[in-house]
Amino acid sequence: MKLGLGVTGIAISLVVATAQGDCPDYTTYAQSPQGNPSSGPLGLPYMRPDPACRTFNSTSVEKVILDMKSRLKDPDIARLFENTFPNTLDTTVKYYNEGENLAFIITGDITAQWLRDTGNQFAHYHNLLSIDADLANLVKAVINNEARYVSQYPYCGAFQPPPESGLEPSVNDWALGVVVNPPVNNQTVFECKYEVDSLCGFIKLSSSYYEATKDVTMMNAEWLAAINQIFRVINEQSQASFDANWNFVSYYNWTGLPGSLPGAVNNGGNGEPKGYTGMVGTHHRPSDDLSTFAFLTPANAMLSVELNNLATILDHAGVAPNISFQAKHWSKTIEQAIWEHAVVDGIFAYETNGLGSRYVMDDANVPSLLSLPYLGFLDMNHPDYVRTKKMLMSRGNPYYAKGRDFSGIGGPHIDVWNPWPMSQVSNIFGTNDDEEILTSLYTIVNNTGGLGLIHESIDIYNVSRYTRPWFAWANSYFSEMLLDLAQRKPHLIFTDSKPYTPGQ
Ligand SMILES: *[C@@H]1O[C@H](CO)[C@@H](O)[C@H](O)[C@H]1NC(C)=O
Ligand SMILES: *[C@@H]1O[C@H](CO)[C@@H](O)[C@H](O)[C@H]1NC(C)=O
Ligand SMILES: *[C@@H]1O[C@H](CO)[C@@H](O)[C@H](O)[C@H]1NC(C)=O
Ligand SMILES: *[C@@H]1O[C@H](CO)[C@@H](O)[C@H](O)[C@H]1NC(C)=O
Ligand SMILES: *[C@@H]1O[C@H](CO)[C@@H](O)[C@H](O)[C@H]1NC(C)=O
Ligand SMILES: *[C@@H]1O[C@H](CO)[C@@H](O)[C@H](O)[C@H]1NC(C)=O
């Protein structure tokens, strides 16, 4: 998707919304500056929908916006925070019924719920869940809806609205020509690419909710069934492709016919063969592209961290000790396998196959190698991370690109000359260097195309060319990073140097 856009600061909002039915489509809305420019040099527009059109209201979220706006020294950054921090609640809660404990959250301009995206679309509200019961209940309903999806289809990553919502499933043109095993029902599943980090997204959101609320009722039968399915996937996908007698073992395979994205997959839809390492294989990357080699280092790093979080909440709740035991066992096994197989000469490979092959690169979104500290896998000062990060933000990474204004890490999902702002956010989470933080921050802030929202990717040859005008996860990740700086580096962004934590 490539979209042009208008010039900075011109208000062309013609639609006046009165009720949800009259609300403008936010994909269209997000492609033009909606007026009320900020007072900084960039004059960024106010892009929140009309209050009547917002999909969830939260007073605690509004308070964080006011707190941050009163402290941020750059009015353009304040405007970006104001637009991005509430974006998930303003625009993506497509269905919510508290009584049913069900919520359907879309990614933005694609009407489907991705496990990965939702895990991140709510990450920046974590500190508010302990003080805002309404927001916490929404998150609980998101988790419960996902528990249903995962218990039924643990290999899939993107889903249709729950039947209770009465919403029509959307047709995914890219999935119509796909043959996937185990087979799926397209009334429930939007897309069944197997990406192990999707399961991590579900655990991450569950841990965030439990940690903040200590509400053990989240761990209902459906949720436990989902967690058990995750261990089924871990057991199946950690195995070598061939057994000792050269029988080829396939638990999941995906074959695209012409017109699907990506196209045909070799070896009967299984992709490249793998050996045993202790890591868990994945078929597709977090970008939804096909993996080159099955063992995706950053997804395994996230899995190791999230399994440990899972064990912690289960132990605290005194629930399912056998699952907790398995979670700790796998968390350790995966962590050891990463250090043993993915790191050579202090450089992390993005993918390995357990047979000696490795692919040194990084992809744009999260989990990525650049985001290893954000994921909680290691400290940003770990020498192997420092060495790897330097290489990733240089020509050593085939998917790094730099133009006059914009630079960063892209990926084959769009192309190599369209890096993603998200990679610059990950870079900030991976450094303590003030100058580097400010350069990455302004590389993002200067390049929203005058629209005041965070996009998927930006063309290094022309920053007016970008993809995905409405991408809730990118908006959330950006504001989460500003909240991190508010604690870690307040002097860089505030008028004073007092740290700020939401909800405190
Ligand atoms: C940059 O892209 C925009 C939007 O596609 C286009 O209108 C403009 O002509 C391009 N500028 C240059 C210098 O190519
Ligand atoms: C949010 O509040 C506005 C009034 O400020 C109201 O019109 C709107 O319906 C509310 N949205 C929801 C989802 O409750
Ligand atoms: C489900 O698949 C059938 C058969 O390919 C197709 O006709 C229909 O449009 C699909 N529905 C959705 C919601 O994808
Ligand atoms: C595809 O996976 C199914 C299990 O879901 C398996 O029965 C079948 O043999 C696999 N096919 C291939 C070609 O690997
Ligand atoms: C935990 O025990 C239950 C009950 O025996 C079983 O159904 C489930 O598969 C076990 N889960 C794991 C991850 O071992
Ligand atoms: C951002 O834009 C300002 C004003 O044009 C410029 O001074 C600054 O160097 C830019 N920063 C980056 C990292 O591009």
Image (cartoon, rainbow, N blue to C red):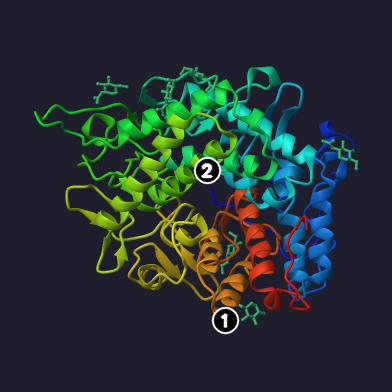
Residue 435 marker: 1
Q: Is residue 195 visible?
A: no
Pick the residue in front: 322 or 111. 322
Q: Is residue 348 visible?
A: yes
Q: Position of residue 288 (x, y in %)?
A: 44, 42
Splitting the image into 4 quarters, where does residue 275 fall? top left
Q: Amino acid at mark 1?
A: Glu
Secondary structure beneath label 1: helix
2 vs 1, front mark: 2
The quadrant of the image that shows the C terminus is bottom right
Direction from residue 492 to residue 238 in the image, left or right? left
Splitting the image into 4 quarters, where does residue 303 fall? top left
Q: Position of residue 4 (x, y in %)?
A: 62, 56
Residue beneath the point at 53% across and 70% down = 406
Tell me: is circle 1 under 8 Å from ligand 6. Answer: no
Q: Quadrant of ligand 4?
A: top left
Residue 312 marker: 2
Direction from residue 379 to residue 163 in the image, left or right? right
Kindly give the residue lying farthest to the bottom in the view shown: 435
